[in-house]
Image: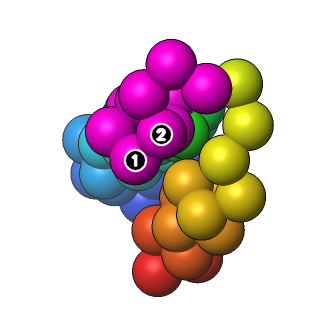
Amino acid sequence: MEFFNGLRHLFVCVFLVSCIGFMVMPAMTDVTMEALCPGRDDCALAIYLTGFQQAV
């Protein structure tokens, strides 16, 4: 158990990075959609580009 005490800072960093990633990914779709197709509710290009960004 003492081994995990030394890695506590690493676990916290991994948790924060994954938490922030889950918050940013849905917003990326909205920003890309507004940049490529302003004023429209559907834009296939924005959806494909967002999927590519998330895969990378």
Numbered disc total: 2
The answer to whether 24 appears left or right of 13 in the picture is right
Crowding at mark 2 (Cα within 10 Å: few <14, some 14-19, many 20+) = some
- What's the colour scheme? rainbow
The residue stretch that appears in magenta: 30-40
Q: Is residue 39 magenta?
A: yes
Mark identifier at residue 49: none
Crowding at mark 1 (Cα within 10 Å: few <14, some 14-19, many 20+) = few
| Viewer can see residue 42 | yes
- Residue most extreme to the top: 39
Q: Which residue is painted at 42% across and 59% down in the image?
A: 3
- Relative to 29, does residue 41 appear above or below in the rendering? above
The answer to whether 55 appears left or right of 7 in the picture is right
Indicate the position of residue 6 as horizontal and vertical percent values: 28, 51
Find disc 2 in the rendering and name its residue: 37
| Viewer can see residue 2 | no
Cα separation, mark 1 vs mark 2, equals 4 Å
Find disc 1 in the rendering and name its residue: 36
Q: Is residue 2 magenta?
A: no
Indicate the position of residue 24 as horizontal and vertical percent values: 44, 32
Proximity of marks 1 and 2: CB atoms separated by less than 8 Å: yes
Dot 1 lies on which element?
helix
Amino acid type shown at disc 1 = Leu
Q: Quadrant of residue 35?
A: top left
Indicate the position of residue 40 as horizontal and vertical percent values: 61, 26
Amino acid type shown at disc 2 = Cys
- Between residue 17 and residue 28, name the one nearer to us: 28
Q: Quadrant of residue 17?
A: top left
- Relative to 28, does residue 55 appear above or below in the rendering? below
Q: Give the prevailing secondary structure in the magenta stretch.
A: helix
Q: Which residue is painted at 71% across and 58% down in the image?
A: 44
